[in-house]
Image (cartoon, helix red, strand yellow):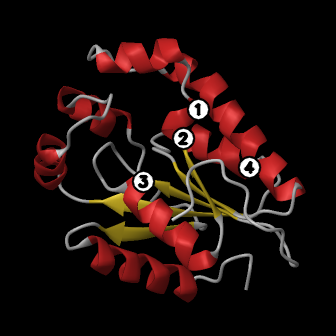
């Protein structure tokens, strides 16, 4: 798996981006890294684009407000456009909780698909309680679900249930993406 921000060789064909989205603990980073490896794309983690103040705020248990997320989403959209212009496809692990944030990525000019990882709050809470070393505390899970605007009517989104092993979730995601053609095909 390529580390975040490591450029891959430039290849021919149209550039595209996938955004793997969902609440904290849904497995975005794991799936995004696996999809990047599968498709030979650059893996990016949106958490790496939060500024220090936002990370500290979340680590202290205070959720970000929408206005605080605006510059973060703008940085992500600009990065997707830069990578596409350099000839690289990307797979981004990105919460994408708000419709307007997903729309901002779409407006980057890069052909996009979104993979929405979903499960019950109980499944996510169990995953968060088992996770160590992440700046996002489990006590912010409720605020994540409150902020989530499910992408149920967005044509470029495939939904994937996260119940199962990472390999099972990856297989489901690939099948869902291949059933709804990607810009690269």
Q: Answer with the quarter of the image where residue 7 lies.
A: bottom right
Between disc 4 and disc 3, whose residue precedes? 3
Which residue is painted at 30% across and 34% down in the image? 134
Label at residue 80? 4
Sooner in the amino-acid sequence: mark 2 or mark 3 = 3
Separation of residues labelled 3 and 1 (CA atoms)? 14 Å
Q: Residue at x 27, y 66 (%)?
A: 162
Q: Label 3: few (<14), some or many (≥20) within 10 Å?
A: many
Instruction: Examine the rendered structure and indicate whether residue 185 appears above or below residue 54.
Output: below
For the residue pair 13 and 149, the one nearer the viewer reads as: 13
Tag shown at residue 46? 2
| Secondary structure type for disc 3 | helix
Percent of width and height locating residue 144: 32, 35
Q: Residue at x 29, y 71 (%)?
A: 166
Residue on which disc 1 sits: 49
Image vertical order of residue 179 relative to residue 29, above or below: below
Q: Residue at x 82, y 57 (%)?
A: 84
169 left or right of 86 in image: left
Q: Read off the residue under disc 3.
A: 29
Q: Residue 133: x and y, percent?
A: 26, 35
Badge 4: residue crowd in 10 Å (few <14, some 14–19, many ≥20)? many
Mark 1 in CB contact with mark 2 (< 8 angstroms): yes
Give the CA separation, mark 4 to mark 3. 17 Å
Q: Disc 4 versus disc 2: distance between alpha carbons?
A: 11 Å
Relative to residue 174, is residue 137 drawn left or right? left
Q: Are marks 4 and 1 in contact (CB under 8 Å)?
A: no
Measuring from the top left, give residue 70's x and y in whole percent: 62, 25
Which image quadrant for residue 99? top right
Where does the C terminus fall, quadrant-wise? bottom right
| 10 Å crowding of disc 2: few (<14), some (14-19), many (20+) | some
Task: State which tag comes first along the sequence, 4 or 2.
Answer: 2
Considering only order in the chain, which callout, 1 or 4, is on the residue closer to the N terminus? 1
């Amino acid at each position: 798996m390529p580390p975040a921000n490591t450029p891959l060789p430039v290849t021919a064909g149209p550039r595209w981006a996938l955004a793997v989205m969902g609440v904290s603990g849904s497995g975005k980073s794991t799936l995004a890294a696996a999809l990047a490896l599968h498709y030979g794309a650059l893996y990016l983690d949106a958490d790496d684009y939060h500024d220090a103040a936002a990370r500290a705020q979340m680590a202290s248990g205070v959720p970000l407000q929408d206005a605080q997320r605006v510059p973060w989403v703008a940085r992500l959209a600009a990065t997707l456009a830069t990578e596409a212009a350099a000839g690289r496809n990307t797979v981004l692990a990105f919460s994408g909780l708000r419709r307007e944030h997903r729309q901002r990525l779409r407006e980057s000019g890069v052909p996009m698909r979104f993979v929405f990882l979903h499960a019950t709050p109980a499944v996510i809470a169990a995953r968060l309680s088992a996770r160590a070393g992440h700046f996002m505390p489990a006590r912010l899970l409720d605020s994540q679900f409150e902020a989530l605007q499910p992408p149920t009517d967005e044509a470029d989104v495939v939904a994937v249930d996260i119940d199962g092993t990472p390999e099972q979730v990856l297989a489901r995601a690939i099948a869902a993406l291949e059933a709804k053609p990607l810009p690269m095909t």
